[in-house]
Amino acid sequence: MSSNAIKRIGVYGGTFDPIHTTHLDIARTALRHAHLDRVLFIVAARPPHKQGEVFAEAQDRLELVRAALADEPAMEASRLELDRSGYSFTVDTLDLLQQQYPGAALYLILGYDSLVELPGWRDPEGIFARAHILAAPRPGVLAPVPPMLAGHYDLLPFQEREVSSTDIRARIAAGEEVRAWLPPAVERLIRQKGLYHAAP
């Protein structure tokens, strides 16, 4: 599908350190719920809210995302933020995507925990002007949605999962089994590269 034919784009940003099956399931749910043409996985280079918390190099994380999406024709890995200097601010990423896909409607895919924190992000009104938000429920997050978000988001019909990239990194470092949470191609690549202290 050419960029001109893409009219509804999901924008799913994150460190993906590593990408896991819940990320893919959230993207699939967003595709169906919002009738998206494409979901772009935007791999963050230097996320301002995770200083010192990224454990794999950006290029390795991009390769993991590409491996995970190899059999997902409606999903695509993007290195947009890796090719930009400085911190990765969502409003700037959305601005660049508007230039790349003129006329397309953008849908920002977030976890509910990020949704309730969004008023503290850089230029939230600019984010609202550029994208509608699709939020996935997160286990244990019960904080109310700030009033300023009213009308700017939909909650995805997604079943909450008790899994995170942090848990997966810890399991790999401890030599524990992780295949239940990782696409097979991602697990193989992690082992091959020895990421997260995994044995080759």
Image (tube, grey):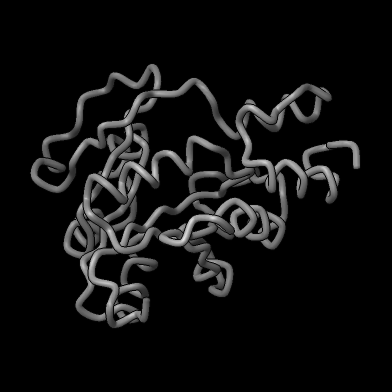
166 and 159: which is toward the camera: 159
Where residue 113 appears, x then y in whole percent?
Answer: 36, 32
- Given residues 126 and 186, the one toward you in this image is 186
The residue drawn where x is 51% and y is 61% is 87
Q: Is residue 55 above or below residue 113?
A: below
Rendered location of residue 88, percent (x, y) = 48, 61
Q: Residue furthest right?
A: 200
**Vertical placement of 158 versus 67: above or below?**
above
Identity of the residue drawn at 35% across and 25% down: 159
Which quarter of the picture shows residue 8? bottom left
Quadrant the C terminus occupies: top right
As displayed, is residue 38 above or below residue 15?
A: below
Taking the spot 57% from the left edge, 74% from the top edge, the residue there is 83
Judge from the rendering whether residue 146 lies leftward or rightward of residue 176; answer left or right.
left
Which residue is found at the position 43% from the left and 39% from the top? 25
Quarter of the picture holding the N terminus: bottom left
- Quadrant in the rendering for residue 59: bottom right
